[in-house]
Amino acid sequence: MNAAADFAAITSFVLELEKLKGVLRKNRPLGQTRFENTAEHSWQICLLAMSVLPHAAEPVDMGRVIQLLLVHDIPEIDAGDVNVYDAAGRAAAEAKEDAGAARIFGLLPAETGAQMYALWREFTTGTCAEARYARAIDRMMPVLQNLNSAGQSWRENGIRIDQVTRMNHPKISGMFPTLWPLIEQQLQDAVARGDLGPASAD
């Protein structure tokens, strides 16, 4: 093992991650006018994941969940953030994300890079309990933000409750069956306040 070469590769990787701080999402931090960045999102969902563990429907390795959450959005450095309700935009970003994952994790020493790329793939496929947990958390946080910001990004993007339910219910309710009804009631309240659009007519 060449320590100098490894450290140079690791330094290149962690400095590349600085760019994640400049990738803007669609939600604004509560009480602020700016948009949050993806690095902030990654930190916050790790803490949410730790906090709701007692309500999980199945046991998970929290250490692995945190690893999945920390790596899952790194390819946004190359692909950018796409509104989760924009199906066409999400489909177009998939190839960019895969190429971005290969490029960015490829900056690391080979073994470490392969491990991180495998974690990213594990999150995207969502087959194991930890990946399902992480994906549920990733969907829960923006819902909580909108519920507590007068539906900021929902209103700005014309989002309706059926879109929110269709996108989030399968992921959240499966892992957190006792929490989803609480979220669902808050969604109905948001519609009543005008923070979230009513269900589509068709």
Image (spheres, helix red, strand yellow):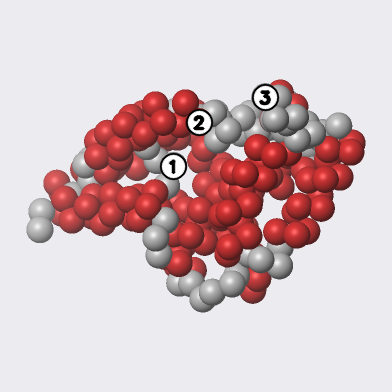
Front residue of 172/71: it is 172
Q: Quadrant of residue 179?
A: bottom right
Position of residue 19 in the picture relative to residue 36 (left or right): left
Q: Residue 133: x percent and y percent?
A: 52, 61
Please, what is the three-letter code of the amino acid marked with disc 3? Answer: Asn
Residue 19, by quadrant, is: top left
Whichever of labels 1 and 2 marks the residue nearer the N terminus, that label is 1
Query: Which comes sooner in the sequence, label 2 or label 3?
Result: 2
Which label belongs to residue 87? 2
Mark-to-mark CA distance, 3 and 1: 21 Å
Does the rendering let one see residue 12?
Answer: no
Label 3 or label 1, whichever lies nearer to me, is 3
Residue 157, given in percent of the width and then of the height, sits at 67, 24
Front residue of 155 and 119: 155
Q: Quadrant of the C terminus?
A: top right
Q: Residue at x 65, y 33 (%)?
A: 27
Element under disc 1 = loop
Q: Going from the N terminus, do you reach mark 3 or mark 1 first?
A: 1
- Residue 173 is situated, as x and y percent measured from the top left of the image, at 63, 60
Q: Which residue is disc 1 drawn over? A: 73
> Residue drawn 69% across and 39% down?
162
The image quadrant where one finds the N terminus is: bottom left
Check the image and name the residue furthest to the right: 193
* Kind of residue at badge 1: Asp
Along the line of sight, the residue nearer the viewer: 47 or 58: 58
Dot 2 alpha-carbon crowd within 10 angstroms: few under 14, some 14 to 19, many 20 or more: few
C-alpha span from label 2 to label 3: 13 Å
Please give the name of the residue rendered at 40% of the width and 40% of the height, measured from the top-left corner.
74
Instruction: Give the labeled residue for mark 3.
Output: 157
Image position of 112 (left or right of 186)? left
User: What type is the residue that disc 2 sits on?
Assistant: Ala
